[in-house]
Image (cartoon, rainbow, N blue to C red):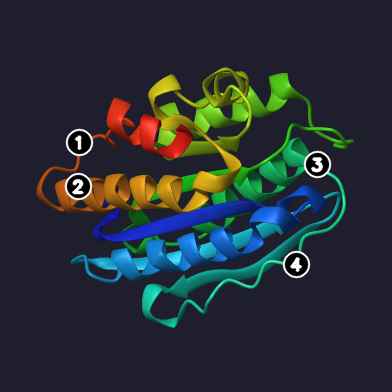
């Protein structure tokens, strides 16, 4: 049986050039998210990958207490599909290689971007959707999609993300969407410790308005 006291949070963060205008808010929102998670019971490790038209793992499986402040250096284009494919498959392979009792009972995969796919070469929308749905159904991963200035629900669905787990945020509201996500993740982690079958809360209408208006 997997370790129900252990959570893995996997972040895929857009660092394309258009993120420059909201760099400070993204960094502050991410750091506040991590601070909120440190208040919760249970163990938690974090993996962070950033992407533009290149892909970089900043750190992997780092204990929550050791996660450093975010340093975002925007540049390049938006190869979202290739980054998702790489991070999902690599994380899946890493967890599969662990003894079952050392695998996290909760896996949360959160994507934040401010642009639409425009430069992937290896993965298609259909292939990513199939991969995300596989991880959701077979391994109970929870996927979250935060998209700026787009219909994030529509885009998220095209990537296999459930509609209630995708949220649109305005460029000036990135801290608000981080706060909403932190609250939902905290609630989910607490619920899972009591009931392994608990589900991630949906983004509420109030959270959606706060992130958009």
Which residue matches tag 4? Answer: 73
Q: Disc 3 to disc 2, how far (Cα)? A: 33 Å
Label 2 neighbourhood size at 10 Å, few (<14), some (14-19), many (20+)? some
Q: Nearer the viewer, mark 4 or mark 3?
A: 4
**Is label 3 in a helix, a strand or a loop?**
loop
* The quadrant where residue 73 appears: bottom right
Q: Disc 2 to disc 1, how far (Cα)? A: 7 Å
Residue 187 position in % (x across, y down)? 21, 48
Q: Earlier in the sequence, mark 3 or mark 1?
A: 3
Q: Which residue is more in the foreground, 77 or 123? A: 77
Q: Horizontal placement of 53 versus 128: left or right?
A: right
Residue 78 position in % (x across, y down)? 80, 42
Label 1 neighbourhood size at 10 Å, few (<14), some (14-19), many (20+)? few
Q: Disc 4 to disc 3, how far (Cα)? A: 16 Å
Label 3 neighbourhood size at 10 Å, few (<14), some (14-19), many (20+)? many
Which residue matches tag 3? Answer: 79
**Is label 1 in a helix, a strand or a loop?**
loop
Question: Residue at point 63% right, 53% down?
Answer: 13
Question: Residue at point 70% right, 40% down?
Answer: 85
- Mark 1 in CB contact with mark 4 (< 8 angstroms): no
Q: Nearer the viewer, mark 3 or mark 1?
A: 3
Q: Earlier in the sequence, mark 1 or mark 4?
A: 4
């Amino acid at each position: 049986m997997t370790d129900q006291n252990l959570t893995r949070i996997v972040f895929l963060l857009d660092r394309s050039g258009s993120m420059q205008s909201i760099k400070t808010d993204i960094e502050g929102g991410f750091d506040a998210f991590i601070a909120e998670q440190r208040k919760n019971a249970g163990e938690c490790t974090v993996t962070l990958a950033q992407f533009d038209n290149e892909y970089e793992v900043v750190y992997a499986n780092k204990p929550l207490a050791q996660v450093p402040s975010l340093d975002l250096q925007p540049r390049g284009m938006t190869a979202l599909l290739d980054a998702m494919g790489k991070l999902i498959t690599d994380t899946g392979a890493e967890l599969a290689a662990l003894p079952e009792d050392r695998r996290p009972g909760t896996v949360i995969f959160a994507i934040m971007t401010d642009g639409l796919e425009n430069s992937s070469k290896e993965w298609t929308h259909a292939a990513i959707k199939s991969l995300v749905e596989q991880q959701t159904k077979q391994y109970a991963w929870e996927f979250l999609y935060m998209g700026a200035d787009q219909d994030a629900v529509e885009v998220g669905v095209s990537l296999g993300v459930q509609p209630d787990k995708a949220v649109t945020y305005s460029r000036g509201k990135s801290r608000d969407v981080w706060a909403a996500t932190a609250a939902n993740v905290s609630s989910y982690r607490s619920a899972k410790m009591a009931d392994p079958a608990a589900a991630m809360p949906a983004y509420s209408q109030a959270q959606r308005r706060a992130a958009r208006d």
